Amino acid sequence: MDPTFADNRQLQCEELSLLIAMFVGDEFQWVGDEVQIESWKSTLDSFSLEQITQNLKEIPPFRFRLLLDINNSCLNVFFPLRYPKVQPECYFSSDNVNRQTWTEINSEIESKIKELNINDECCILELYQHTKSYLVERFSQSMISNYDDKNEEKASLQLSRILIWTHHLLSLGKRKNICQWAEELGLWGFSKPGYPGIIIIEGLYDKVHEYISRLKSLRWQAITVRSEQTELLDSKEQNYEERVKIRLGRIKPGVTELETMSEISAK
């Protein structure tokens, strides 16, 4: 097998594992027939750096969509076999915007892909966040009826879920801080030591950002918040802890260390 081909598909599997870990339930949806979807799931279930070169030519190109939480719109994604060496094919879809608006949004997506993929890097998380921000800023009141910024003042709780990327995560001291600070601040999540280091954390918005601030105060070769999702809760809804516990299958706050990307995607 062409080493470049194997490298590309390995990067695709790694990015997909992270996406599946970040987007729960129907937020991530495969797009294909039953055979294709089963082959994709099977590939990611067995994904590891040692196994990724096996039988990849038999796996069809990945195709999926990510819900944008704004009036039932979504970002549709197709990975060419050579992605990220070539650009992904992505487009916005919604039943609640006119043709002109659809064209404007997809033009913005196309421009952003060229910017993000300039160094042949995986870019879907960044593209998703940019698209969502663009929709809110450009069309929140006039084009997207279900998104109402005024509702924010009615909410007393805001949940945040973030993905943090580090060049590497090996230090036992840092790994201890990652776990202890999460428990102290009442946050839930997972981490993967190694190259790169991955931290996924979820909880109240202000606590999550306090956690980020503490992490960034440590010495890193590189650390980046690659993705953030927020969720506004009604002021009467005080059982957010139970929702997080059910979703993550965890009773007590804290960070659990996992060894591989596939373990993260399974959570």
Image (tube, rainbow, N blue to C red):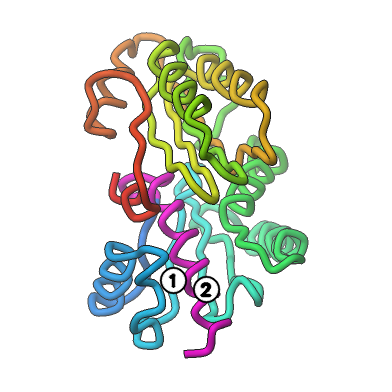
Q: Nearer the viewer, residue 202 or 166?
A: 166
Q: Residues within 10 Å of mark 1 (few under 14, many from 20)?
A: some
Residue to which mark 2 is pinned: 79
- Marks 2 and 1: in contact by CB < 8 Å? yes
Query: Is 19 in the magenta?
Result: yes
Residue 18 lies left or right of residue 87; in this view the side is left
Give the alpha-carbon distance from disc 1 to disc 2, as whole Å.
Answer: 6 Å
Residue to which mark 1 is pinned: 63
Q: Is residue 78 above or below residue 262?
A: below
In the image, what residue type sits under mark 1? Arg
The secondary element bearing badge 1 is classed as: strand
* Residue beneath the point at 53% across and 89% down: 2
Q: Residues within 10 Å of mark 2 (few under 14, many from 20)?
A: some
* Residue beneath the point at 72% across and 42% down: 138
Q: In the image, which residues are magenta?
A: 1-27
Q: Main secondary structure of the magenta part?
A: helix
Q: Is residue 262 above or below residue 42?
A: above
